[in-house]
Amino acid sequence: MVDVEVIKQRLNQLSASLNKIERFKDISLEEFLEDDIIQDVVEYNLFIAINMMIDIATHIVVDNNMGNPETLGEAFSILNKEKYLNDDEAKIYRNMVGLRNILSHEYLKIDKRIIYSVLKNNLVDIKKFIIFINENFI
């Protein structure tokens, strides 16, 4: 059985990070590329948000005896196999894990245009994850 309080704590952190990112969603690419502080805030909070998503998914999988994820993205695959996530959702969330790994390990090579694209186009995927968790596990 899922510990709802653990999930709620992580959702709160996820929402807080998402709110910090969203402060910058209306800036232009030029503004983003010229401001390393904004880049840092967006990148760091994306990293935290994705980590919270991974923690939540892993917690749900393990606590419901669905499996024992061996990689950061495997919990999303298990949730897909168990019919909680469709194929597209699982792929999107596994791709987010890839972005998290780049933010964590390849910070000297981060393509700022990709981060800007995520800022402009993909925050909705994080919001959908929050809704999914609230509707299914809270």
Image (cartoon, rainbow, N blue to C red):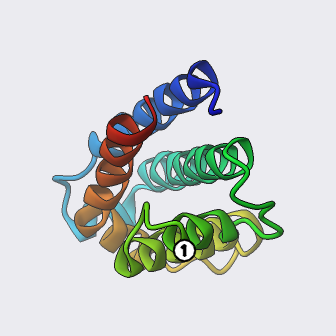
User: Where residue 66 appears, x then y in whole percent?
Assistant: 69, 58
Residue 1 located left or right of residue 93: right
Depth check, front residue: 17 or 26: 17
The vertical placement of 82 against 37, above or below, is below
Residue 97 located left or right of residue 67: left
The number of callouts visible is: 1
Name the image quarter holding the C terminus: top left
Residue 134 figure quarter: top left
Residue count near mark 1 (Cα–Cα under 10 Å), binned few <14, some 14–19, many ≥20:
some
The residue lying at 65 percent from left, 81 percent from top is 109
Q: Helix, strand, or loop for circle 1?
A: helix
The residue lying at 68 percent from left, 71 percent from top is 74
From the image, tell me which residue sits under label 1: 81
User: Where residue 70 appears, x then y in whole percent?
Assistant: 83, 68
Residue 15 figure quarter: top left
- What amino acid is at disc 1? Lys
Depth check, front residue: 108 or 67: 67
